[in-house]
Image (tube, rainbow, N blue to C red):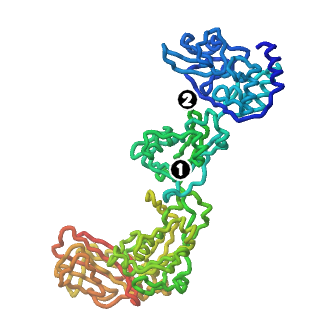
């Protein structure tokens, strides 16, 4: 550039008025026109810059490009063809051609050359001043060339920078820098959407206003969320949700079928959102979001997530002109199943009920019963501790099981919940529920207090969620009564939470309650007194199929303070086949007494039990009397005429509490050697 031009520019600049106005900036993108290694020029966002401001010919640019020279042509700002030895300025276009077709093109920028004549001079100062004072509007490459300090606006600072170049103090920097949108994605606390709480929710964040991006190249860049997982996932087990602008949330599975391979990337906006909206294509630009949408959210719900599953979400912006993509933000989320910190603990059974005296009244039967056991749900967590976690939607219930069969008519279950329901104690005997009417509940059958009893008893489906409890219910209790429980009956009450979406069930806490079980004698000694099974009764000698003797391991001193010392002992005898009683010859001998024998005249049904002492010999034998008999003990023999194949005899040694008639099996013997 000649010195005379610089002197004229300084004189012109001294009389110009100055103000400023915002103008566009630009950002990087790729191109099919490529640079050679070591080239000083820069290709970005469809532009080529970093050129010599003292003058750049087409041949100079060809020397820096890696494409075939004869396929590179150029036109100036007025679209006139440029020869190899001609100078290029801002707005000139370099084209890669194949015959007559243009394959790719780049626009030349020389920072400070605002009018496109290839030189930085007084005419550029004059143009910038007019732009600052709103007397002319700059756009495209000319606006970029004027914004020499790359602050996104043409203003007094740019004017001063060009003046400084013209004064010979500091040239305008031709290397520039790449400016990208100021945007990212941020993970936020999930909100309840369609009745579920997503595992993770993300929000688009931008610090820029619509005025700040006005006219900038990246304003029209395409914006997308790109999702991938570190494991293969089924598309119909991952739910995506989206919300933007004033529109409500929309959501659905990724797809009805198929899988996403590990690390396979999936477009949420272009692919999923377009499908949900039933559109062939869908796109949002950066300008759309900043100006109109503002609130742009994405959420993921993976109820079937396997341990260690991690999602990676990228905020990707694409230059729609060049196709170059820019990953502006990356965030990951590892899915986990959170099990609430809750437990059930016993409370005083005599203080429950509407009168706080342990009395419970059946809702329909009006039966009054006393609670055997009462339990309270408690949690160390507050709602804020689990905010945004899926467990808030888990259904909470008390699950009751018994270790022995029980009659539904004898089992009473009750529940009580605080505000907002304002309910007192609600419940009844299990038989009021049609499903359990006249039923015997098998051992280990799970009975849900809320869903199986309280809800049906109230005539509706009742679901209490963990959120309900933490937010509204607060106190939740259950109480149980069993009428005339069998000794040794054990009830297990389990606090369970169920994922209402997947049906997965989680055991959070459990409590066991056992009904009274008295102390019982140890197993007796059982011995065959004779290898020949010979029995002499009534002066006759018999050879029997089985001959055994029961004695005890106790002494009079060892049972002196035992409740069972005065209980009655007996042998219960049964067969696995129906038998003619006349074919069954029984023998019994109590202590030092003589043998007694006889047949059972009636048909003996399979499984029917005959008590040796009570039904056959007559009389009773207390446990202390059995102990006192020493080695004589209680003897039993049997002989079956023409026994059927596979006949099995079962003998139970039992002891009975005469005060309530309850008997307890101490030992069981089976014999099949007929």
Mark 2 sits on what residue?
A: 321
* Location of residue 186 in the rendering, given as x and y in whole percent from the top left corner: 62, 47
- The answer to whether 114 is drawn above or below residue 357 in the figure is above
Neighbour class for label 1 at 10 Å: few (<14), some, many (≥20)? some
- The answer to whether 475 is drawn above or below residue 285 in the figure is below
- The answer to whether 609 is drawn above or below residue 206 in the figure is below
Q: Quadrant of residue 43?
A: top right
**Which badge, 1 or 2, comes first in the chain's sequence?**
1
Residue ranking furthest to the top: 85
* Location of residue 101 in the rendering, given as x and y in whole percent from the top left corner: 49, 17
Q: Nearer the viewer, residue 595 or 242?
A: 242
Please, what secondary structure does the residue beneath circle 1 have? strand
Please, what secondary structure does the residue beneath circle 2 have? loop
Neighbour class for label 2 at 10 Å: few (<14), some, many (≥20)? some
Mark 1 sits on what residue?
A: 243
Q: Is residue 504 visible?
A: no
Q: Nearer the viewer, residue 412 or 137?
A: 137
User: Residue 496, which numbered label?
Assistant: none
* Location of residue 183 in the rendering, given as x and y in whole percent from the top left corner: 63, 41
């Amino acid at each position: 550039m000649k010195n005379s031009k610089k002197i004229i520019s300084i004189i012109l600049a001294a009389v110009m008025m100055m103000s400023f106005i915002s103008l566009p900036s630009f950002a990087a993108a790729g191109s099919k026109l490529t640079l050679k290694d070591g080239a000083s020029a820069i290709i970005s966002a469809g532009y080529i810059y970093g050129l010599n401001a003292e003058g750049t010919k087409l041949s100079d640019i060809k020397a820096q490009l890696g494409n075939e020279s004869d396929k590179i042509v150029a036109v100036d700002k007025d679209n006139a063809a440029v020869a190899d030895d001609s100078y290029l300025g801002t707005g000139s276009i370099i084209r890669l051609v194949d015959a007559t077709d243009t394959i790719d093109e780049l626009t030349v920028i020389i920072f400070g050359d605002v009018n496109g004549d290839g030189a930085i001079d007084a005419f550029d100062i004059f143009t910038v001043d007019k732009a600052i004072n709103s007397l002319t509007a700059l756009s495209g490459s000319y606006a970029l060339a004027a914004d020499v300090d790359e602050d996104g606006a043409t203003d007094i600072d740019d004017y001063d920078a060009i003046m400084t170049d013209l004064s010979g103090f500091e040239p305008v920097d031709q290397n520039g820098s790449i400016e990208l949108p100021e945007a990212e994605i941020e993970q936020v606390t999930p909100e309840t959407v369609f009745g579920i709480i997503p595992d993770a929710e993300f929000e688009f964040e931008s610090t820029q206003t619509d005025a700040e991006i006005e006219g900038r190249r990246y304003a029209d860049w395409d914006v997308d969320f790109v999702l991938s997982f570190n494991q293969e996932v089924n598309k119909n087990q991952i739910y995506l949700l989206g919300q933007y602008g004033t529109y409500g949330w929309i959501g659905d599975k990724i797809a009805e079928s198929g899988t996403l391979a590990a690390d396979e990337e999936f477009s949420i906006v272009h692919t999923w959102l377009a499908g949900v909206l039933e559109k062939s294509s869908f796109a949002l630009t950066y300008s759309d979001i900043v100006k109109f949408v503002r609130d742009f959210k994405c959420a993921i719900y993976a109820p079937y997530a396997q341990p260690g599953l991690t999602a990676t979400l990228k905020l990707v912006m694409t230059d729609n002109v060049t196709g170059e993509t820019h990953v502006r933000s990356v965030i990951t989320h590892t899915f986990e199943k959170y099990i609430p910190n809750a437990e059930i603990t016993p409370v005083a059974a005599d203080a429950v009920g509407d009168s706080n005296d342990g009395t419970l009244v059946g809702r329909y039967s009006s039966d009054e019963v006393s609670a055997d056991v009462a339990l309270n749900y408690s949690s160390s967590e507050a709602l804020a501790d689990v905010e945004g976690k899926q467990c808030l939607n888990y259904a909470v219930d008390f699950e009751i099981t018994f270790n022995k069969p029980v009659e539904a008519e004898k089992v009473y279950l009750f529940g009580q919940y605080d505000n907002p329901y304002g309910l007192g104690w609600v419940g009844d005997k299990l038989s009021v529920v049609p499903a359990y009417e006249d039923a015997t509940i098998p051992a280990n059958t799970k009975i849900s207090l809320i869903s199986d009893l309280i809800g049906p008893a109230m005539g509706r489906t009742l679901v209490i969620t963990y959120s309900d409890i933490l937010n509204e219910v607060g106190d939740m209790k259950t109480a149980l009564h069993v009428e005339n429980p069998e000794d040794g009956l054990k009830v297990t009450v389990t606090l369970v939470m169920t994922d209402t979406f997947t049906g997965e069930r989680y055991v959070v806490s459990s409590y066991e309650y056992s009904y009274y079980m008295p102390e019982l004698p140890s197993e007796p000694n059982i011995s065959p007194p004779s290898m020949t099974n010979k029995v002499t009764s009534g002066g006759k000698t018999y050879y029997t199929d089985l001959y055994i003797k029961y004695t005890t391991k106790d002494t009079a001193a060892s049972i002196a303070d035992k409740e069972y010392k005065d209980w009655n002992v007996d042998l219960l005898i049964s067969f696995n086949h129906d038998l003619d009683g006349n074919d069954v010859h029984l023998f019994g001998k109590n202590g030092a007494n003589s043998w007694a024998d006889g047949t059972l005249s009636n048909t003996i049904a399979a499984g029917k039990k005959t008590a040796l002492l009570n039904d056959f010999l007559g009389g009773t034998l207390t446990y202390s009397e059995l102990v006192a008999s020493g080695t004589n003990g209680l003897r039993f023999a049997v002989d079956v005429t023409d026994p059927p194949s596979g006949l099995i005899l079962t003998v139970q040694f039992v002891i009975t509490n005469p005060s309530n008639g309850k008997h307890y099996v101490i030992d069981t013997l089976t014999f099949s050697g007929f």
